[in-house]
Image (spheres, rainbow, N blue to C red):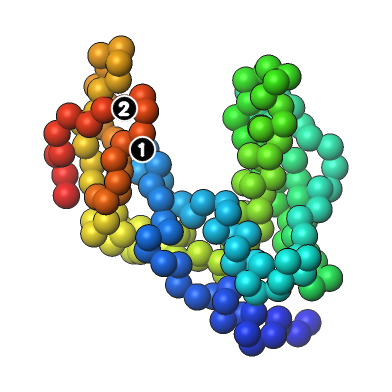
Amino acid sequence: MEPFPKEANEILLSPIPLTDIEIKPDGMIYLPEIKYRRILNRAFGPGGWGLVPRGPHTIGTKTISREYALFCLGRFVSVARGEQDYFGSSDGLPTASEGCKSNALMRCCKDLGIASELWDPAFIRSFKDQHCVQVWASTNTGGKKLLWRRKDRTLDYPYKEDTPTRK
């Protein structure tokens, strides 16, 4: 099988701008889903790629999942099962379904090499050392927890930072 055009490959394999990388309070770094979509649009053009469901949603008591296939320029690229926490309210089903689709997109994009540095342990350690910090935080209920954040950001509600403990 032929690789995608050189111009597309350069876009897909480009390093991710460090300002685009986020960190969850538990220390997991990630690229927001919209960034994957923008990279695919730059590489293949709007309409040049698509995420196709491969069956119905599977809805458990706390999780919704669905398998999706990624096609680019009419070619099959990858298949992945996306998942999202779901708490049983029918009002939250559309939002959970979208989260599931976004999770599948991120997983499929790994096969194109997009943001591959986010799975490299050496990169993760270096990024966290240079751009993130662990801080003690409290909530309005009085609980305290050690959380991660970017050095150039603040914690989001419901957390309020107490004091930094690690660079």
> In this view of the protein, which residue sits in the foreground, 114 or 41?
41
> In this view of the protein, which residue sits in the foreground, 30 or 47?
47
- The residue drawn where x is 70% and y is 20% is 91
The image quarter containing residue 57 is: top right
Mark number, residue 25: 1
Closest to the camera, between mark 1 and mark 2, is 2
- In this rendering, does residue 7 appear at all? yes
Q: What amino acid type is highlighted by mark number 2?
A: Tyr
Query: Where residue 84 appears, x then y in whole percent?
Result: 62, 35
Chain-order first, disc 1 or disc 2: 1
Q: CA distance from mark 1 to mark 2?
A: 10 Å
Query: Where residue 75 appears, x then y in whole percent?
Result: 81, 71
- The residue drawn where x is 37% and y is 38% is 26
Q: What amino acid type is highlighted by mark number 1?
A: Pro
> In this view of the protein, which residue sits in the foreground, 98 or 13?
98
- The residue drawn where x is 41% and y is 50% is 22
Number of residues whose C-alpha sits closer than 10 Å to that of mark 1, classed few (under 14), some (14–19) or many (20 or more) = some
Question: Of helix, strand and loop, which one carries label 2?
Answer: loop
Circles 1, 2 touching at the beta carbon (< 8 Å): yes
Q: Is residue 32 left or right of residue 167?
A: right
Mark number, residue 156: none
- The residue drawn where x is 57% and y is 76% is 11
Query: Where residue 117 appears, x then y in whole percent?
Result: 44, 65
The image quarter containing residue 99 is: top right
| Residue occupied by mark 2 | 159
Question: Of helix, strand and loop, which one carries label 1?
Answer: loop
Query: Where residue 80 appears, x then y in whole percent?
Result: 70, 52
Image label count = 2
Number of residues whose C-alpha sits closer than 10 Å to that of mark 2, classed few (under 14), some (14–19) or many (20 or more) = some
- In this rendering, does residue 61 appear at all? no
